Each structure stands twice: as structure tokens, then as C-alpha cells.
Image: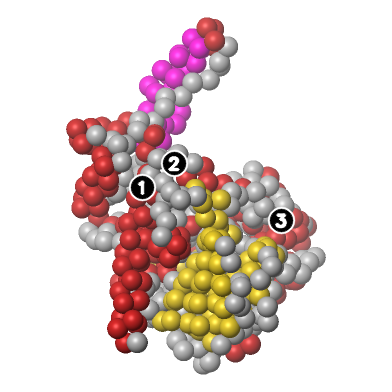
């Protein structure tokens, strides 16, 4: 097949959309300014191989997205981490594929359906893993599809998904550790390869927990340019709109960075209070998002960046009891959508996600067996927060035992449901949109603070907090049990019919902006011709 590429300076830095004309063997690629394009491939990502070879189409250690031209087909490559997707649509002999849902919709002239109530369920299905997630996304004109983890092969005869290469077996801790260390060394070399038009900087995150500590201990010998940490963990009894001035636990990873000799920048997890001009981007992939804790990162990035995180470590590196809560299998199930909310944001800001624990994660059963093995006994602390594999990695890198992995914390930002914009200007635009779609009358928008207050109580209720809610629910459950045979009861959240509406609004809003960019570029090219 032949590749024709067009660079669009105004498109998101790492976004791309490709149209495959299967009848004529032609691939037309429109891409942002930092996508690396060569005659036989394009990539916004990294892998464990030489950049010039462009051989990321089979490896299980690839992060980001791209495409590889074949003689009579093109392979679209997804990330080995389930925080990024590809989206595609088929129309006759043409197949349009993109790493951005809004850009795909802009290219095919379609939109999400404001009255579709299926989007939250479809979004949440990603937690079920790479075999059981929902691939079809309804639109106004029909549907588009998404691909997570699997590669997508498009030829003149068929469209088919193909698996990535499986990781090697891990019979021991050493075998697993060496796999992680050696493949990261190759990835780091790929990121900095002089054959790139723009070599990548490598940044990482650091908390006081297990996962980021193990990542940095393992990766620092091969090079990390900068580390960011968030000093304060989230308040467990308050949501984002309530936790200003609340006592937070210390989650500052600066001492761990010092022990590894890594430079550290401290981020404000509540920077969205001061500036949140890209809020809509967080809702272009998920109907709810917890990743705003890294919003402050954007003012520090200097160029296209590879961002290492410990996302998925709680699934791959727990003890067997913890692992069974999600499942000990090879399908990469998740317990929460952490990292998924940055899918559109990273394309605009210019960074590539590498959630390190996804490397080799399809051998989860073997990794759990290592965790439970006798050789790991010296690295067990026998508490409710016990992760022998990351502890051993960190302690063998001379990080003192007492400065990490002592208690479970998190810095994510959790907003009340349904998702309503935090920023005033975007919120007013969203309410206007809801009214236009007949989803919420303007006279009811003033109730939002009350709805937020009530739904926050339901979100945070525990046996010791908001106890009165438990008492009332228990009483109603007993009455229902006596009258209708239903032994449980929970209050329904208000405005639940709006779940998914912010996703639809933001995706369509962003698609309009991308369509204007593409149209302007098209007119400019016609003028030149």
C-alpha cells in the first residue's frame, strides 16, 4: 500500500487519522506536528526496538499508537496498556482509523448521540479486560468501533484484529525483574533515538506508595529526566469540591527521589481550581474522570514526553487474595479507570503514557505465583498493604524500607456524579446544551449545588460517616423485604439520567473544533493548487 501523509500544525500534537482506500491500496494520513512519520510507518509512541526499523507491529512492549504499511495491508498498532484506544469506522471501500474519537467523528462527519444512555456502560466495560470490553460506540448516524490492546489489520479483503506477541514465561523473580529492566532499557533507547525527528524526554511520577517507587528504582539506571510528585493525598471523606483546606495525608515522594538521585518537581493536585481551560479534554474518553491530579503537569512539559506511571501495579503486584478480587488471568482486567481519562489530553499536550506494570501483565498468574513464593518471604511485611515484588525491587535499589509502602494512599481527584463541568464557563455552556437537547430545563440548573450535596453523601457514605443514611436505608430495606421480598435498598442518585451526557457534549464539542481545523487546511491546499 502507498502512504500519503499531511502534517497539520493546528491538530493536537500527537493525534492522527488515516483513511484506507482499500480499492486503490492508498492510505491518506492527517497528523499533528509531533507524530513521527516515515515512508513505511508512523508512530506516536515507543517500543523495545530500534526506531529506524519501525518493528512495533508484533511486540508486546509498545506504548502509544501508530501504523505500519504492508504490501497489501496496513497494521494499526495499539498500546499494550489499556489506557489508550484506536477508533475506526467503515464506509464502503474506505476505513477511517484514528487515535482520537473526536478526530475520527470530525473526519467522517458524525457525532455522538445526546440521547443515548449506553455510554457509561460502554466506558466502564474496559474494566472487564481486553476480551470482554464493548467495541461498538453508538453515534447519530450509526456507530463507530474502538480497539483496545489488539492490533487492527486492514487489507483490501478484510478488517481483522490480531494479538500482540505474548511475554516470555516468568519462572522466578529474577526472570521477571530482568524482563522489566531490560525492556525498559530498550524503550528508553528508542525514546532518545537520534533517528527521531523529535527525541523524547522521559518523565516519571513518584508517591510514597509501592508502584511508582518500584518503577523508578528499576528505570532510573537507564535514564529518567524528571520526576513529579504530589505532596498531599486525597482526603478520604471529601470529594474534589469539598477538600480545600481539609487535612490531607503526606504523599510526597521527594525523599524517595533523593535516594535514587532523581530531580523532583512538586505538583498541586488542586491546580484545576485556578486554571482548568482543558477540562473538556478529560471527558473525551470517559464519562467520569479521576486524572485531574496531574493537571499541573502541563506547565512543566518542555517537549514531547514519555510519562512513566505505576498505574496497574495494584492489579499485577498484590498478594493472591488481592489479585482474586479482580481475577488472576491474562485478559488485563482493571479495578478502576485510572489513567484512561488522559487519552485525549495527552494527544493535545504532547505526552505518551507508559504505565509500567502493564509490561508482561498478561502473565499475571505467574507474577502472582512469584509474589506468593517462598523466595519473597524477606520482602513481606505482613500488613494489609503488602506487595513483595515492588518492595524487593525498591529495597534492592537501596531505598530504605520505612520510607515507602507503609499505607495505602491516592492523589486522584474525584468529582461528584453526574459529571458536571467544574469550570464555570464550560458548565454554563454544558447547561445550555442540555436545555437544547431537552435533557434538563434551564429552570432546574440552579438545583445543581443541592444535587451535588446529596449525591456526595451517597458517594461517601460509610458505616461511620453519614450514619443516618445507613439507618434509613436499612429501615427501608426491612420494609421492602417484608412487603416485596427485597432485602436491600439504596437511595438513587439525583440526575442520574445525565450520566454520559458530559462525555457526549465534550466529544462533539471537540469534534467540531477538529473539523474546522481540517476544513481550513483543506481550503488552504485547494488555494495553493
As measured in the structure, the alpha-carbon distance from the residue carrying label 1 to the one carrying label 2 is 12 Å
Q: Please provide the residue range marked out in magenta.
A: 456-480
- Viewer-closest of 251 and 379: 251
Mark 3 or mark 2, which is nearer the start of the sequence? Answer: 2
| 2 to the left or right of 72 | left
Quadrant where the image shows the N terminus: bottom right
Give residue 366's quadrant in the image. bottom right
Task: Please name which of the two marks, 1 or 3, marks the residue nearer to the observer.
Answer: 1
The residue lying at 49 percent from left, 55 percent from top is 338
**Circle 1: is it few (<14), some (14-19), or many (20+) Cα within 10 Å?**
many
| 202 to the left or right of 170 | left
Against 138, residue 317 (above or below) is below
Against 396, residue 284 (above or below) is above
Mark 3 or mark 1, which is nearer the start of the sequence? Answer: 3
As measured in the structure, the alpha-carbon distance from the residue carrying label 1 to the one carrying label 3 is 33 Å
Q: Position of residue 428 (x, y in %)?
A: 21, 47
The residue that disc 1 covers is: 502
Mark number displayed over residue 279: none
The residue that disc 3 covers is: 330
Say whether residue 479 is magenta: yes
Amino acid at each position: 500500500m502507498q502512504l500519503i501523509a499531511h502534517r497539520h500544525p493546528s491538530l493536537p500534537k500527537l493525534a492522527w487519522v488515516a483513511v484506507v482506500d482499500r480499492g486503490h491500496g492508498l492510505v491518506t494520513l492527517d497528523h499533528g506536528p509531533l507524530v513521527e512519520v516515515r515512508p513505511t510507518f508512523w508512530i506516536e509512541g515507543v517500543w523495545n526496538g530500534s526506531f529506524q526499523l519501525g518493528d512495533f507491529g508484533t511486540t508486546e512492549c509498545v506504548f502509544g499508537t501508530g501504523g505500519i504499511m504492508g504490501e497489501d495491508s496496513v497494521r494499526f498498532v495499539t498500546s499494550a496498556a489499556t489506557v489508550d484506544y484506536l477508533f475506526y469506522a467503515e464506509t464502503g471501500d474506505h476505513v477511517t482509523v484514528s487515535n482520537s474519537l473526536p478526530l475520527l467523528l470530525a473526519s467522517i462527519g458524525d457525532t455522538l448521540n445526546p440521547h443515548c444512555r449506553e455510554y457509561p456502560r460502554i466506558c466502564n466495560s474496559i474494566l472487564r479486560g481486553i476480551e470482554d470490553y464493548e467495541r461498538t460506540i453508538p453515534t447519530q448516524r450509526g456507530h463507530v468501533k474502538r480497539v483496545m490492546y489488539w492490533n487492527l489489520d486492514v487489507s483490501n479483503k478484510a478488517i481483522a484484529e490480531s494479538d500482540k506477541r505474548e511475554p516470555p514465561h516468568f519462572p522466578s523473580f529474577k526472570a521477571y525483574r530482568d524482563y522489566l529492566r531490560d525492556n525498559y532499557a530498550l524503550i528508553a533507547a528508542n525514546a532518545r533515538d537520534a533517528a527521531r525527528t523529535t527525541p523524547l524526554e522521559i518523565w516519571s511520577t513518584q508517591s510514597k506508595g509501592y508502584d511508582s517507587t518500584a518503577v523508578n528504582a528499576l528505570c532510573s539506571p537507564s535514564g529518567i529526566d524528571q520526576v513529579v510528585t504530589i505532596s498531599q493525598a486525597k482526603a478520604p471523606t471529601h470529594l474534589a469540591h469539598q477538600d480545600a483546606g481539609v487535612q490531607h495525608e503526606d504523599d510526597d515522594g521527594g525523599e524517595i527521589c533523593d535516594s535514587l538521585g532523581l530531580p523532583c518537581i512538586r505538583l498541586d493536585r488542586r491546580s484545576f481550581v485556578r486554571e482548568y481551560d482543558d477540562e473538556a479534554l478529560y471527558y473525551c474518553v470517559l464519562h467520569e474522570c479521576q486524572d485531574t491530579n496531574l493537571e499541573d503537569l502541563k506547565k512543566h512539559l518542555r517537549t514531547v514526553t514519555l510519562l512513566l506511571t505505576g498505574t496497574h501495579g495494584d492489579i499485577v503486584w498484590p498478594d493472591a487474595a488481592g489479585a482474586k478480587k479482580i481475577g488472576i488471568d491474562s485478559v488485563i482486567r482493571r479495578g478502576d479507570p485510572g489513567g484512561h481519562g488522559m487519552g485525549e489530553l495527552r494527544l493535545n499536550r504532547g505526552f505518551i503514557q507508559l504505565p509500567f506494570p502493564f509490561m508482561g501483565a498478561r502473565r499475571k498468574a505467574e507474577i502472582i505465583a512469584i509474589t506468593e513464593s517462598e523466595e519473597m518471604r524477606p520482602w513481606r511485611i505482613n500488613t494489609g498493604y503488602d506487595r513483595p515484588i515492588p518492595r524487593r525491587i525498591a529495597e534492592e535499589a537501596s531505598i530504605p524500607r520505612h520510607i515507602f509502602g507503609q499505607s495505602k494512599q491516592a492523589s486522584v481527584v474525584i468529582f461528584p456524579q453526574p459529571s458536571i463541568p467544574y469550570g464555570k464557563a464550560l458548565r454554563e455552556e454544558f447547561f445550555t446544551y442540555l436545555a437544547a437537547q431537552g435533557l434538563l430545563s434551564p429552570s432546574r440548573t440552579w438545583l445543581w449545588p443541592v444535587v451535588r450535596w446529596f449525591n456526595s453523601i451517597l458517594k461517601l457514605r460509610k458505616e461511620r460517616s453519614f450514619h443516618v443514611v445507613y439507618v434509613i436505608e436499612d429501615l427501608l430495606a426491612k420494609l421492602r423485604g417484608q412487603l416485596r421480598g427485597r432485602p436491600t435498598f439504596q437511595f438513587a442518585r439525583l440526575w442520574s439520567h445525565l450520566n454520559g451526557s458530559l462525555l457526549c457534549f465534550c466529544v462533539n464539542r471537540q469534534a467540531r473544533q477538529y473539523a474546522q481545523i481540517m476544513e481550513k487546511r483543506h481550503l488552504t491546499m485547494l488555494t495553493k493548487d
